Image (tube, helix red, strand yellow):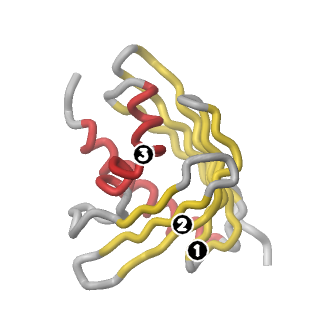
Amino acid sequence: MMKAGELVIKKVFNCSKRELFDAWSQVSLLSKWFFAAPQKYKDSRVRSNFTVNGEYSLTMFFEDGSEASIWGHYQEITRYSAIVMSWNSTIAKDSLVRLGFSALSANRAQLTLKHSLFPDEASKAAHEQGWQACLANLEKLFGERE
């Protein structure tokens, strides 16, 4: 079976590059937006040792009582610019997520998310849906400020 291609998502946020990076690197912020549902049931449970080779795990809780867990290691961290981490879930073992952060202005930043090494197209499609939902929640975290 052929592996699926890379998933690439680019999104602009109303925040500084540093604030965007912090939302990915600080447990207190991650737990507030990292869930793949339009309405939050409760904060996600996040454990993170945000250092190179540090481990992370995240559990999202859904209204129907189900949970989804993700885990991996941070492989590269370039403060305020990039994060590379291994990504494991029930439908994607040993996949890879690369995050790039760039400033468009003082209060606008772009995230480039690249997720690769999916086992198949179904896994890639499910992750694309999940990422879009999570990133919509991240957008809400920063609010509609201009």
Q: Position of residue 120 (x, y in %)?
A: 67, 73
Q: Position of residue 43 (x, y in %)?
A: 27, 63
Q: Is residue 26 left or right of residue 89?
A: left
Q: Is residue 138 left or right of residue 91?
A: left
Give SS at disc 1.
Answer: helix
Amino acid under disc 3: Gln
Name which of mark 3 and mark 1 comes first in the sequence. 3
Within-10-Å neighbours for mark 1: few <14, some 14–19, many 20+: few
Q: Position of residue 59 (x, y in %)?
A: 41, 71
- Quarter of the image with the C terminus is top left
Residue depth check, mark 3 versus mark 1: number of the one nearer the observer: 3
**Which residue appears farthest toward the bottom when viewing the image?**
65
**Residue at left offset 34%, top offset 65%:** 44
For marks 3 and 1, give the CA distance. Answer: 30 Å
**Residue at which label 2 appears:** 125
**Residue at left offset 63%, top offset 72%:** 92
Name which of mark 3 and mark 2 comes first in the sequence. 3
Q: Report which quarter residue 13 is drawn in.
A: top left
For marks 1 and 2, give the CA distance. Answer: 5 Å
Q: Is residue 59 left or right of residue 50?
A: left
Give SS at disc 3.
Answer: loop
**Residue at left offset 41%, top offset 14%:** 105
**Which residue appears farthest toward the top when viewing the image?**
106
79 vs 28: above or below: above
Marks 1/2 in contact by CB < 8 Å: the verdict is yes
- Quarter of the image with the N terminus is bottom right
**Residue at which label 1 appears:** 122
Amino acid under disc 1: Ala
Q: Position of residue 137 (x, y in %)?
A: 30, 51
**Residue at which label 3 appears:** 26
Residue depth check, mark 3 versus mark 2: number of the one nearer the observer: 3
Marks 3/1 in contact by CB < 8 Å: the verdict is no
